Amino acid sequence: MKAGSWTPTIPATGATPDRVTSVYVDYSFPLNQYVITFNNALGTSINLTPPATPPAGFPGIISPTGINVGDLILLSSTRGYAVGEVTDIAAVGGGVVRITFADSDPLNINQSGAASANVAFLAAGAGTPTPPPPTIGNRLWAISYYVEVPAVATLQTPRLMRQVSGLVPQPVADNIIGLNLTYDTCDGLTGGPTCAALNDPIASGFAPSAIHKANIQVIGQSVLTHGNKSRSMALVTSVSTRSLNFKSQY
C-alpha cells in the first residue's frame, strides 16, 4: 500500500493491492537537441543551451510543454546512463536554463554521493581541463497507478491514484478496492499452471526476458445506500510485452 493510506490493506477485501509503473522516453519534447554542460563534478545541476538556429516553434525548457520540477531526465554519454529528478529550474540568461538535481528529492532518485550509476558519474571532470564527454538528455515519463485508502476522518472511499514521475499524485477513480498485476511466462516449451498468473515470476525462477504477458485487474465497488448490498465489478486486461523472449508453438 502506498504511503498516505491509514491501513496496509484494503478494508473491503483484506488484501494488499499492487502498484503498476510504466517508464518510457518522451520523444515529443526535443530535449536531446539542447547542449548540456555540467556545472560541477557532483552533477547536482546542468545548463541547457538551445540550438544556435532553432526551427520555428522550437519549445523552450521553461514553457507550457517544457520541463517541470519533479520531471525525470535521462542523461547518456559514452560513460553510460543516469537519471536525475528535477528539483529546480531557473533561467540564467541568453536562452540558457539551469536544471538542478538536488539530493533528497521526492523519489529519492538523486544520489550525488553514490559510487556509480548516478549523474555524478557522468559529470566527473566538470570544471577541469578534461571535461566530461558530450551528454544527451531525454525526459522520462514514469507513470504509476496505485490504490490509496484515505484517513478515516475524511470519510472518503478507497481510490485509484495516478502519479507522474515526481509530481503530486492525483485521484482518477473512487471506490476502487483492488489492483492486481500478474505475469505469464508460458510459451511453446513451458506450460501448465507454474507459468501463468505469477505474482512474482523472478522468485519463481524465471528471468525477466521470459515474461510474455502482463495481466492487470481493477476492482470497483459501489457505495452502500440505505442498507442495500454493494456491487462489485472487475475489469481485466492483458498486455503482451515487446522486445522480450517469444516462442510460438506453431
Image (spheres, helix red, strand yellow):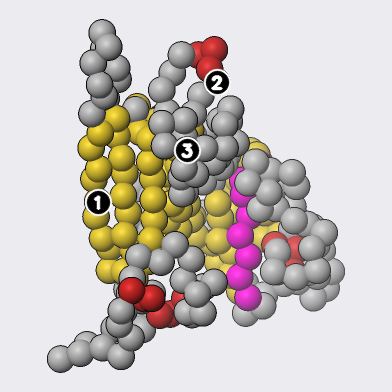
Please tell me in which quadrant of the rendered image residue 36 appears: bottom right
Rendered image: mark on residue 236: 1
Sooner in the amino-acid sequence: mark 2 or mark 3: 3
Within 10 Å of disc 3 (Cα), the crowding (few <14, some 14-19, many 20+) is few
218 is within the stretch colored magenta? no
Within 10 Å of disc 2 (Cα), the crowding (few <14, some 14-19, many 20+) is some
Residue nearest the observer in this picture, 36 or 152:
152
Residue nearest the observer in this picture, 242 or 227:
227
Where does residue 87 sit, x and y in percent of width and height? 65, 41
- Residue at image x 75%, y 47%? 103
Res 103 visible: yes
Amino acid on which disc 3 is placed: Gly
The residue indicated by pointer 3 is: 14
Where does residue 211 sit, x and y in percent of width and height? 38, 74
Q: Distance between the residues labelled 2 and 3?
A: 16 Å
What's drawn in magenta, residue-wise? 80-87
Q: Is mark 1 on a helix, strand or loop?
A: strand
